[in-house]
Amino acid sequence: MTLAAVLPQLITEWGLTSTEAGWLGGIYFAGYVVAVPVLTALTDRIDPKRIYLASAIIAGLASIGFAYFANGFWMALALRFLAGAGLGGTYMPGLKALTDQLPAQSRSRGVTYYTGVFALGTAFSFLIGGEVAELFGWRWTFVTAGLGCFVGAGIITFVLPAAGHREPATPVFAAFGQVLRNRQALGYMVSYFGYAWEVFAFRVWVVAFLFFSQTHNALGSDVLSPTLWATIFALAGVAANMGFGELAIAFDRRRVVIAVSIISLVAGVSVGLLSGAGYGAVIGICLAFAMLTSGRNAPTNAGLVAAAPDQLRGTAMALHATIGYAGGIIGPLAAGIALDAAGGIEQVAGWTAAFLAIAVGAVISALALLFLNRRRD
């Protein structure tokens, strides 16, 4: 979320439209979607540790490259795509490495902790990105993010045990087909698409939205900065992710995700309708929305892990990430298009339209589990 922390500055400095800004937010996930089916599927065959290390280095170099070479829309687009490909080789392969080394009865809780810590990193990328940009300029924000990738690679090098070579009996394309015919797994994949649509569109646009709300309400510098609020929202999402993950262990996971998706839809529409309201009301409803969107991550990922056969878990995760994070491409872009169509980032109507577009993700999440996955978990 480093880009989101400085997006208002880039819009001004480079003269970006809202649609172009949406592309910059979404292209990161396009890189992820291109890389993740290949790299995560390979974890059924080779040690995920090797994939993680190479990908973390690529992500770090792409981020530092953004700091030094990005001077406009097209170069920024290419470098964010490459950084997203690096994420494609770290997030799901890291989760696969974790679940491979946990007993079956501990995997759901392991997924909850893993996704919770991922969300924690997201939260601090808002805070650190905003503070570094304010002190040293936005380019140093991306240098800092790139160094974080190298720190992650160092931790994995010394902490994660190596795994041996594994050759599954099922050929690659047959494995993909077998996973796609698993309706329970497919339901969680499409639900994850809706989750990524909603959560990443919100995270990409929330700083710009809070800047608008402060200006609209004629507030001075005495209020908390938008990047600090975005950090608070993301930290609240960590708590919600852990809480809903535990709730899904105790009760029927499918019903928990459907219920949270429906409530999230109501919250997202409410943010849109209250775009022109007082700043306190905007902060309150955004906080609730952030918790409801982030809270679906752990139970959705755990549902996929539980539905996939052990020998095809890497392939299932590859498809899950590919289908799911396609929503991360479309959601920010859809919000940007809605903003431009309804008057732009300086208009209440623009932000109302943007959040209505963002809330579509919750509809997709709920419908996927209602109609594709009819089994109790």
Image (tube, grey):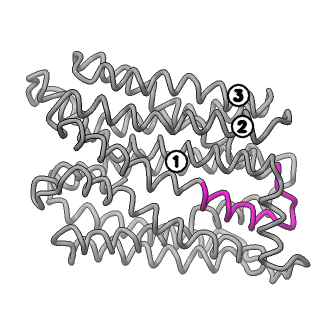
* Residue where numbered disc 3 is placed: 256
**Residue neighbourhood size for the residue with mark 2, other residues' Cα within 10 Å, grouped as few (<14), some (14–19), many (≥20):** many
Amino acid at pointer 3: Val
Q: At x 54% / y 34%, what residue is drawn?
A: 362
Majority SS type along the magenta span: helix
Above or below residue 19? Residue 47 is below
Q: Secondary structure at mark 3?
A: helix
Q: At x 31% / y 60%, what residue is drawn?
A: 24
> Counting residues from the N terminus, which is met first, the one under dot 2 or under dot 1?
1
Residue 315 among magenta residues: yes
Residue 236: x percent and y percent?
Answer: 47, 32
Magenta residues (range): 307-323
Quote the CA–CA distance across marks 2 and 3.
10 Å
Number of numbered discs on residues = 3
* Residue where numbered disc 2 is placed: 369
Q: At x 58% / y 25%, what residue is drawn?
A: 262
**Residue neighbourhood size for the residue with mark 3, other residues' Cα within 10 Å, grouped as few (<14), some (14–19), many (≥20):** some
> Counting residues from the N terminus, which is met first, the one under dot 2 or under dot 3?
3
Above or below residue 330? Residue 211 is above
